[in-house]
Amino acid sequence: MTQTIIDIVELLKKYDLISGENISSQLHISRTAIWKHIQQLKKKGYHITAKPNRGYHLLKTPDTITTEEIKQVIKTKHFASSIHHLPIVSSTNDYAKTLAKKGEPEGSLIIADKQTGGRGRKQRKWISPEKGLWFSLILRPKLTPNDAMLTTMCAACAVTKAISELTTLKPRIKWPNDILINGKKVCGILTELSAEIDEITYLIIGIGLNVNNKIPNELKEKSTTLKQEIKKQVDSVLLLSSILSSFEYFYQELNNGNILKIKDTWRSYSSTIGSKVTVSTEKEVVTGVAVNLGEHGELIVKTNLGEKKILTGDISYL
Ligand code: BT5
């Protein structure tokens, strides 16, 4: 897309209805040129209606995001300063890992329209068809490996904040890495790292967010999409941009040692603390009330036998 076309898309997104005259004066191009660009956009999958004497209205953006659109909309300082946008990939986390090993800088964004081998924790499958947001960020936090979970918490806060700001929905974080809407999973986060004993070499944060995509029948009972919840299409680029801005902010706070702020924000967005839970870990199943977060983001569960600190696991609410 040319810069003019990107600018036209920006204006169409900004105004519900915008006249050719208004676009013409803001971008200094003729109305005939605008009409031609609008025809090109329609061919690219943008649904635009032209109302006589009133102007253009953007009904629907195309299903796939373009790198130019991302660059145009994103307002971060460091995050996404390098963007790898792939139409199809096995897993953005795997792709990111290969780049990170070769020295790819912190903040690089790897985003795919579709993943064929999307992964959850413990090699579980993550279903990632077109129209969802599937992306990974390469980070090199100044943390010990013990504290890696705090980065996942920053990401979860960022996704929750962005969804809350762009929609009327009230997403809630479920420890350790899920975001739920009305009790159903809309987003999962996969954090993977390479580390020495006392420092992280690189950390990959993979975020899978169901936006306008379909989900298979077998997941429908426990999962949802943003489109399903608000009954209309969501602008994936704006959502991505908002997630990255908030993530960058929380990540800076974390690197500045402001861990309390991250934990407080996380608690305010979470449905876990105060809930009766069953936690399944590799070793055991623990039942009790989730009472707090530990120093490194562990879950503290009060059981009949006292408090237990759990590093990672799967929880279900009772
Ligand atoms: C997660 O694992 O929730 C982490 C998912 C991370 C996915 C992102 S996408 C970009 C990056 N590249 C990758 O390859 N991965 C990351 P976990 O907590 O283990 O949950 C996995 C479980 O979620 C599966 O076993 C299913 O039950 C369920 N699931 C699979 N696909 C889903 C989807 N699209 N929406 C909701 N739930 C899903």
Image (cartoon, rainbow, N blue to C red):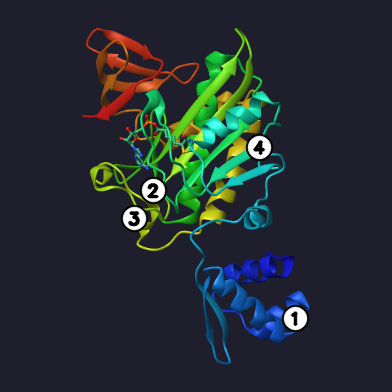
Circle number at residue 25:
1
Q: Nearer the viewer, mark 3 or mark 2?
A: 3
Mark 3–mark 2 distance (CA, rounded to whole Å)? 10 Å
* Amino acid type at image mark 4: Ser
Q: Of the residues under marks 3 and 2, which one precedes in the sequence?
A: 2
- Across and down, in percent, residue 86 comes to 57, 46
Q: Which residue is mark 2?
A: 170
* Amino acid type at image mark 2: Lys
Q: Of the residues under marks 1 and 4, which one precedes in the sequence?
A: 1
**Image point (62%, 68%), residue name:** 9
Per the image, label 3 sits on a secondary structure element best described as: helix
Q: Which residue is mark 4?
A: 108
Circle number at residue 229:
3
Mark 1–mark 3 distance (CA, rounded to whole Å)? 38 Å
Q: Are there few (<14), some (14-19), or many (20+) residues within 10 Å of tag 1?
A: few
Per the image, label 4 sits on a secondary structure element best described as: loop
Instruction: Report the label total.
Output: 4
